Image (cartoon, rainbow, N blue to C red):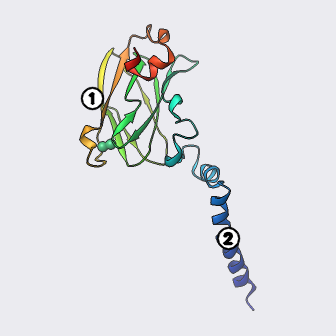
Amino acid sequence: MNWRKVRIFLVTVLVLCLIPLTRFYQIDEPLLRLLKGSRHVDPLSLHLAGEFVENNLGTQQDPDGSVTVRMIAMQYLFIPHCIVVPAGVPVHLRITSADNVHSLVFNGMDYAVKVLPGTISQAELLFPRVGEYKTVCREFCGPGHYAMRSELQVVPRAEFPALRPEERGNCAAQ
Ligand code: CUA
């Protein structure tokens, strides 16, 4: 009898039995995060838990004076639809997709951020001038692709801290 083959067979059976168990106990997400790194995110549960829940989206002031912007791209919109950032301040963008591959570009700037489901795309941005930028999707993502656009407002650096949190996340609240 070949013990090596028996051992490989038993380990294979054990691993195959463990796979359904990970689904049952919902440990596959933490496990995947461990294996794939901290940028892994489950596209199907973005609205339920984690950093991309609705009230955590938009622009947040960081302790060092920079800001962090969290967004979701999905067919066929960016959430939040309109974001506000201060001029001349580093912007840490964190964005993920709920479905397809998208690409976020800011008209008039050179930035292009590819957005994929299952992972968090990070980008360091800086908008030196006050103004409005149309943000559009530049990756064909389905029949509504050409309508997938939103807005970025760059406000004077001194004005930004005076905005209420809900005004930072949604331009319509201003
Ligand atoms: Cu999203 Cu094209």
Q: Earlier in the sequence, mark 2 or mark 1?
A: 2
Which residue matches tag 2? Answer: 17
Question: Quarter-wise, where is residue 147 in the image?
Answer: top left
Could you say whether the residue bearing mark 1 is in a helix, strand or loop?
loop
Which residue matches tag 1? Answer: 107
- In the image, 31 versus 25, the foreground residue is 25
* Residue 14 position (above or below residue 131): below
| Mark 2 to mark 1 CA distance (whole Å) | 51 Å
Q: Is residue 173 left or right of residue 21?
A: left
Query: Which quarter of the image is occupied by the C terminus?
Result: top left
* Residue 100 position (above or below residue 131): below
Q: Is mark 2 within 8 Å of ligand 1?
A: no
Could you say whether the residue bearing mark 2 is in a helix, strand or loop?
helix
Question: Quarter-wise, where is residue 3 in the image?
Answer: bottom right
| Ligand 1 positioned in quadrant | top left
Image coordinates for residue 24, horizontal then vertical, percent: 65, 59
Q: Is mark 1 within 8 Å of ligand 1?
A: no
Q: Disc 2 or disc 1, which is closer to the eye?
A: 2
Q: Residue at x 49, y 46 (%)?
A: 119
Q: Amino acid at mark 2?
A: Cys
* Residue 25 position (above or below residue 51): below
Instruction: Work out which residue is located at the far bottom of the displayed protein and give it.
Output: 1
Q: Is residue 79 left or right of residue 14?
A: left
Image coordinates for residue 70, horizontal then vertical, percent: 48, 31
Q: Residue at x 41, y 30 (%)?
A: 80
Query: Which quarter of the image is occupied by the N terminus?
Result: bottom right
Which class describes the residues within 10 Å of circle 2: few (<14), some (14-19), or many (20+)? few
Q: Amino acid at mark 1?
A: Asn
Q: Are marks 2 and 1 in contact (CB under 8 Å)?
A: no
Q: Residue at x 70, y 72 (%)?
A: 14
Which class describes the residues within 10 Å of circle 1: few (<14), some (14-19), or many (20+)? some
